[in-house]
Image: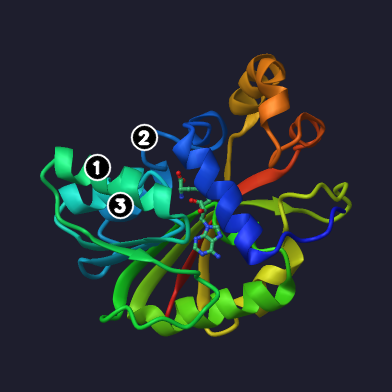
Amino acid sequence: MEPALSLAAEVDSYDRLYRNGLYWLFWHSRKPEPELLEAHRTGAIHGKRALEIGCGGATHSLWLASHGYAVTAADFAPSALKLAQRKARARKLTLDFRLLDVTQPSDLGAPFDLIFDRECLQDLETREAREAYARNVTGWLAPGGMLLVVSHVATAGAPPPRRPHLPEAEIPSLFEHLTLESVSDLHVGAVLLWMKTVVPAERHRLERFPYKQLVSFKSVRRAYRFRKP
Ligand SMILES: C[S@@+](CC[C@H](N)C(=O)[O-])C[C@H]1O[C@@H](n2cnc3c(N)ncnc32)[C@H](O)[C@@H]1O
C-alpha cells in the first residue's frame, strides 16, 4: 500500500483533475445513482434539506436542487466547486456551495434530511479520518435523516490497492450511531472495461491513478443506506 498523501497534496491532485477535465475519465457520471432516485421516488427521504459531500461536478446536487431540495454542496477542491457553480448558473439553480474538508468540524447551518456521498468516503485513507467523517456526518443529520453512501469497498481477502480504502468490515463500527437500512451491490464492470481500453493513451498524465492500479481495481461497489434514529 502506498503511503497516504498529505491533505494539501490530495486537494491539489483533485483540483488539477477538475481543472484539466480528467475527472470525467474516472468517476464523473451525468446520470444520478439509481439508489438516490429510488429513495426520492419512494418517499424514503423525510424532508427537503440535502447535503452532498465530495460533490465534485455536482450531478447529484443539481438533480436534487432541480427536484425541490434545498441543497448544500461541499467539496475541498476549489475547481470542483467552480465547475459545479457554472453548471448551477447555467441551469438557473441556487445551491449553497461550501469549500470544506469533510473530516473537519464545520457549521453547515441546518441539520439535513439527506446526506449523499458518492465516492468521497472511500478516499479517506486512515481510520482516524473516517471516524472524523462519521462523527461530522452523524452530527449534520437531522433525526430521521438518511445517509446514502456510494463507495468502492475492500472486502475480506481482496488485494490491497491504494484505493479503495474503505474496508467493508469497518462500516458497522464507523456508523455505530446510525441504523443500516440497506446495502446494494452496484455494477462496475462496464466502466472498468472502458477504462482499460481508453486510459493507456493517457497514462503519462495520470499521477493520481496509475494505470497499474486501475487494472487491479477489482473492488466491490456498494450503496449503503443509513438512518439516524
Ligand atoms: C471520486 S470523486 C467523486 C465526486 C462526485 N461525488 C461524483 O460522484 O462525481 C471524490 C470527490 O470527493 C472530494 N473529496 C475527497 N476528500 C474530501 C474531503 N476530505 N473533504 C471534501 N471533499 C473531499 C474530491 O475533491 C472529489 O471531488
Q: CA distance from mark 3 to mark 1?
A: 13 Å
Left or right, residue 199 beside residue 149: right
Q: Residue at x 53, y 39 (%)?
A: 17
The quarter holding residue 168 reads: bottom right
Image height check: is 71 above or below 144?
Answer: above
Q: Work out whether residue 200 or residue 7 is closer to the camera in this orientation and state it.
A: 7
Q: CA distance from mark 1 to mark 2?
A: 18 Å
> Which comes before the other along the chain, label 1 or label 2?
2
Image height check: is 84 above or below 176?
Answer: above
Mark 3 or 1: in front is: 1
Image height check: is 213 above or below 142?
Answer: above
Crowding at dot 2, Cα within 10 Å, few <14 / some 14-19 / many 20+, comes out as few
Please give the residue where the numbered disc 1 appears in the rendered image. Answer: 86
Left or right, residue 197 beside residue 63: right
Q: Secondary structure at mark 2?
A: loop
Q: Work out whether residue 190 or residue 164 is closer to the camera in this orientation and state it.
A: 164
> Which comes before the other along the chain, label 2 or label 3?
2
Q: Residue at x 30, y 52 (%)?
A: 61
Q: Quadrant of the C terminus?
A: bottom left
Please give the residue where the numbered disc 2 appears in the rendered image. Answer: 31
Q: Looking at this view, name the residue that lies furthest to the left.
A: 92
> Which comes before the other along the chain, label 3 or label 1?
3
Question: Where is residue 185 shown, x and y percent of the image?
Answer: 59, 45
Question: Where is residue 205 shown, x and y percent of the image?
Answer: 66, 29
Q: Secondary structure at mark 1?
A: helix
Q: Is residue 184 visible?
A: no
Please give the residue where the numbered disc 3 appears in the rendered image. Answer: 61
The kind of residue on which mark 1 rests is: Arg
The kind of residue on which mark 2 rests is: Lys
Mark 2 or 3: in front is: 3
